[in-house]
Image (cartoon, rainbow, N blue to C red):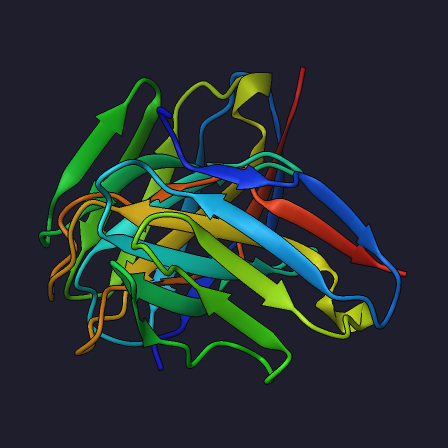
């Protein structure tokens, strides 16, 4: 089965600093999703990447997909307290029946004002 | 509704009690997924429906877990004789299409936090 490893597991940064979260897959990536989750809440969709080299941005968050390395990175520029939460990467595990997402363990981000 | 709706938001059950968790997907969404998220972990796949057909239930941890989607819209996840290790957030997601390459994002509900005491 596909496994996703996220690093770091947790991160504390000072407001205004940049940060990067990585997600590495054990198998070929058919699609890579980034979600944000606040404690006790559901997942909020951030971005989906499908093609190698693809890069997408939403406000101050940029995600890239390196298909060869089977890796994606999420970069936050000039972090703010509102960025705090758990960031989860999910990859499509293509099979005959459907397209369930396999998730990494998450990266817990805290932004100190 | 505009998004995926789950109810109840919180559920406390005594060990041995049966519980039923409801998911209202986005209207017209073909695919529906249930995930279990233990504290401090990423979500783990439980089961998948394409319309009313349960095509994959490989993630259900035991035969105490049962899911249905009889009319291809609302889904219910039932847990019989709950145990403490069932305590988790149960997330439901729906998606517009299926197919080998998922090219639309899956929308998640806010989850049901189940605590078994």
Task: Point out residue B10 in the picture as x, y percentages from the top left corner.
Answer: 72, 42
Q: Residue at x 52, y 16 (%)?
A: A16
Q: Residue at x 20, y 71 (%)?
A: A94
- Please tell me whether residue B52 is drawn above or below residue A40 in the rendered image: below
Q: Nearer the viewer, residue A99 or A81?
A: A99
- Please tell me whether residue A60 is drawn above or below residue B113 in the rendered image: above
Badge count: 0
Q: Residue at x 55, y 19 (%)?
A: A82
Q: Nearer the viewer, residue A50 or A10?
A: A50
Task: Point out residue A78 in the picture as x, y percentages from the top left corner.
Answer: 45, 18
- Please tell me whether residue A104 is drawn above or below residue A95 in the rendered image: above
Left or right of B87: which side holds A84? left
Task: Point out residue A104 in the picture as x, y percentages from the top left corner.
Answer: 46, 61
Q: Quadrant of residue A59?
A: top left
Left or right of B2: which side holds A48? left
Q: Nearer the viewer, residue A17 or A6?
A: A6
Left or right of A105: which side holds A48? left
Q: Quadrant of residue B117?
A: bottom right
Name the outermost residue toward the front: B71
Q: Residue at x 54, y 48 (%)?
A: B22
Quarter of the figure that contains the N terminus of chain B: top left
Task: Point out residue B68 in the picture as x, y percentages from the top left corner.
Answer: 44, 65
- Please tell me whether residue B93 is drawn above or below residue A105 in the rendered image: above
From where the camera sits, is residue B29 visible?
yes
From where the camera sits, is residue B43 visible?
no
């Amino acid at each position: 089965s596909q496994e996703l490893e996220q690093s770091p597991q947790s991160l504390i940064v000072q407001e205004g600093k940049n940060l990067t979260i990585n997600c590495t897959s054990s198998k070929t990536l058919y699609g890579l999703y980034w979600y944000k989750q606040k404690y006790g809440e559901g997942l909020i969709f951030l971005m989906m990447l499908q093609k190698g080299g693809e890069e997408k941005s939403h406000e101050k968050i940029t995600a890239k997909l390196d298909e060869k390395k089977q890796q994606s990175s999420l970069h936050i520029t000039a972090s703010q307290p509102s960025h705090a939460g758990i960031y989860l990467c999910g990859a499509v595990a293509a099979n005959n029946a459907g397209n369930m997402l396999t998730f990494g363990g998450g990266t817990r981000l805290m932004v100190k004002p | 509704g505009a998004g995926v709706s789950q109810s109840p938001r919180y559920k406390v059950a005594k060990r041995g009690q049966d519980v039923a968790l409801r998911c209202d997907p986005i209207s017209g969404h073909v695919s529906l997924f249930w995930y279990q998220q233990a504290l401090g972990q990423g979500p783990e796949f439980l089961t998948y429906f394409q319309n009313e057909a349960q095509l994959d239930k490989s993630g259900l941890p035991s035969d105490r877990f049962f899911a249905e989607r009889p009319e291809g819209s609302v889904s219910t996840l039932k847990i019989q004789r709950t145990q403490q290790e069932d305590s988790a957030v149960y997330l439901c997601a729906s998606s517009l299409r299926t197919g080998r390459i998922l090219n639309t994002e899956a929308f998640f509900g806010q989850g049901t936090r189940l605590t078994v005491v």
